[in-house]
Amino acid sequence: MADKTILIVGTFDTKNDELGYMAERIRLMGGGTLCMDISVLGDPEKPTDYSKHDVAKAAGSSIQAAIDSGDENTAMQIMAGGASALARQLCQAGKCDGVVILGGTMGTDAALDICQALPLGVPKYVVSTVSFSPLIPPSRLSADIQMILWAGGLYGLNSVCKSALSQAAGAVLGAARAVEPSTGGMPMIGMTSLGSSCLKYMKTLKPALEQRGFEVAIFHATGMGGMAYESIAREGGFACVMDFALPELGNLLAGSVVHGGDDRMLNAGAAGIPQIIAPGCLDLIDFAGWQDIPERYQDRPFHAHNRLIKSAGLNGEERRETAREIARRLKASDTPAHVILPNGGVEEWDRPGGEAHDPEAFAEFCDEMRKVMTDPITFTEIDCHINDQHFVDTALEIVDRWIADSTIRMEV
């Protein structure tokens, strides 16, 4: 009997050989398979475990409706919705342990929806002709998606594409066997940060929170990390959040590609999770290393972190707008929210003498924060830098108070 079962998804009318090859490889390695067809016009050579009619029905539609739409994009979105719903049901019922999806642009579009529908920890592999392509926006990527470039596989099997398909088959089965599922034994705190050369609080907060009985997950606030953090918050996966690194929000407002999605800072509140917030590194806008710095940022304080990411300072009015946006987002929910403002600075490079030191612009930010952080937000201003011990002590005082009054629930 197979130890793990992999769901294989694709258009079996046009890619039957390729999908069948992956299924065969998985079975040869001792895994089980379930096949789901998301074709619209054609039929597979042999029946699949879940037909295209099953998929369309799961979307509240039908294959005929997809055909009658007369539009391939509309038709595939029907199939993507149905496949996402079915895949989630199968995983929740314990009938599949991972998913591998094959496609060109059409199949990849559906694959991204399917992967986002599945919870963190379910192995998700997409074999695509456009893997790692700029065609795929970061917002479409699920937190733990894996992608393999389907080289030489646009039409028909050959030794080049078999290399990719066999790796994908082994990878998804191996991941399903190796993954360590969340035990859910301790309440979890979700924390955002950047590397410790910029923000240091996590180094002392993590052990202190663990001593209080929490598991602590720290997310790198460089776009994808924020999206992963938000996806878990959306599912109610945290007992409390410490959202202390907010450059993704400033990047979003400034139009940078390095952002955490339009729903950044909204999901914890919507899920009823208490929030402790601080404006770590909200003085900078980040750019991908390959981008030219736009002209309007040329005269700003500048920090080149490495070849992947570089940052320019926000001016006073831009920082005021970020303060107003924080307030707008926190006030969208009745969830308890406590904002800490360390008025001595919000990241290591803004200290006197640092590359990002801009006391006038920071003063404008602090002034706006004092104006907009009103009820129902609780606001505490402290005379220190975010990397000082006083900031950590203040955050822990809030945590201890919330544990005592049951704002943070310790039971799992």
Image (tube, helix red, strand yellow):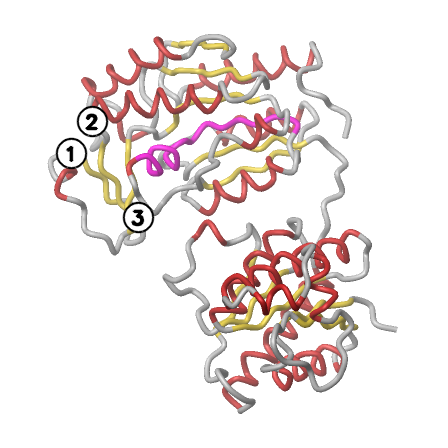
Relative to 30, residue 318 above or below: above
* Residue projecting furthest to the bottom: 158
Q: Which dot marks residue 300?
A: 1
Query: Can residue 317 be found in the magenta stretch?
Result: no
Image spot of residue 207 (x, y percent): 59, 29
What type is the residue that disc 3 sits on?
Answer: Ile
Q: Residues within 10 Å of mark 3 (few under 14, many from 20)?
A: some
Q: Nearer the viewer, residue 328 or 274?
A: 328
Decide which of tag 2 and tag 3 comes sooner along the chain. 3
| Secondary structure beneath label 2 | loop
Residue at the outermost right position: 1
Question: Mark 1 vs mark 2: which is more N-terminal?
Answer: 1
Quadrant of the image for the C terminus?
top right
Q: CA distance from mark 2 to mark 3?
A: 19 Å
As drawn, 131 above or below 322 = below
Does 100 sit left or right of 74 as displayed?
right
Q: Position of residue 124 (x, y in %)?
A: 62, 61
Residue bounds of the magenta highlight:
239-253
Which quadrant of the figure has residue 134?
A: bottom left
**For discs 1 and 2, the disc positioned in front in the rendered view:** 2
Name the residue carrying label 3: 309
Q: Which residue is mark 2?
A: 315
At x 49% / y 21%, what residue is drawn? 330
